[in-house]
Image (tube, rainbow, N blue to C red):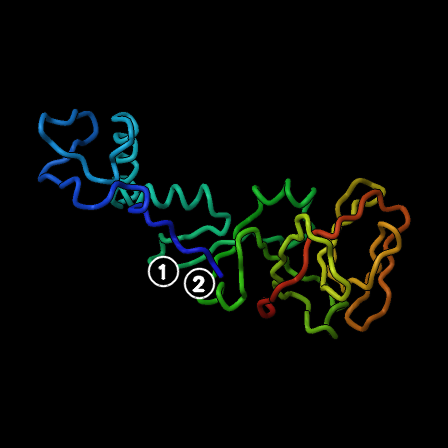
Amino acid sequence: MVAPYTDVRSFARPQGRMMLTQERPGPGRKKKKGEVLEDWAIGFAPSVRIVIEEKAEVDDVTGPEWVRRAVEEKLNPVEKANNDGFNTVRLPVFYDAPCGPWSAVLESAERFTINEATADWLEIKDGDAFFQVTGESMLAAGIPHGSLVVIRPYGNKRPSRNDIVFVQILNQYDVWEATIKRLDGWDGEIPRLLDGENKPYSIPETAKKIDVVGRAISQMGVL
């Protein structure tokens, strides 16, 4: 499931201890004697509050909303995009083989936006990404050419036999390739892979590096 937005009120002092006055400090103006800050502003240095209020004004949102979005973007890789007026989720997407190790390319990857209901249906979690399938080798397994597959990295977990896996291969020319196949087991450190018809998929002997990055969780239809 997609992580919900962080409620900035959970970072503030309990409501009721501070009251909002008719006028609040704005950019370039110091707090007047006896004036009370909003709950969300407590704990921020005056210079930081000024920056927040300026940026919130540019984005046409309140200070708390701007802070919440900043926290969400920093802590939650499944990014929320609210500028379209809907609850949407943005995931990294790869239309070709990532040109480097998985952990190194996620930050710069293009983002693909879907609505929150679709994200829930796809069972998306933080750290997931889309990969667009090229070719018909997994058609018999229900994964046609052009579909977007949700990939969930294994991290420290061991891949299981029969998982549909996303594999990165560094070839002899130092170019990264990628494929989605079924894991049939291991020959030492080399994965045995099968296509959608359970025919063996041969990894070139000249491959310099083979990474079984993650498994396919779900997919969207052909694009």
Pointer 1: residues within 10 angstroms few (<14), some, or many (20+)? few
Tag 2: Cα neighbours inside 10 Å, few (<14), some, or many (≥20)?
Answer: some
Please tell me in which quadrant of the rendered image residue 172 appears. Answer: top right
Q: Residue at x 33, y 49 (%)?
A: 7
- Kindly identify the amino acid type of the residue bearing the numbered disc 2: Asn
Q: Position of residue 158 (x, y in %)?
A: 73, 54
Residue toward you, 22 or 85 = 22
| Residue in front for this viewpoint, 13 or 74 | 13
Contact check, label 2 and label 1, Cβ < 8 Å: yes
SS state under label 2: strand
**Residue 155, image x, y percentages:** 66, 49
Q: In the rendered view of the protein, which quadrant contains the C terminus?
A: bottom right
Q: Is residue 146 left or right of residue 161?
A: left
Picture coordinates of residue 4 (x, y %)? 41, 56
Specify whether 103 is left or right of 186: left
- In front of the other: 121 or 94: 121
Who's the residue at 68% across and 67% down the image? 145
Amino acid, disc 1: Phe
Residue linked to disc 2: 115
Q: Which mark is residue 86?
A: 1
Mark-to-mark CA distance, 2 and 1: 8 Å
Residue occupying the point 55% across, 49% down? 110
**Vertical side of 45 occupied by 99: above or below:** below
**SS for tag 1?**
loop
Image-quadrant location for residue 71: top left
| Residue 63: % across, % down | 26, 41
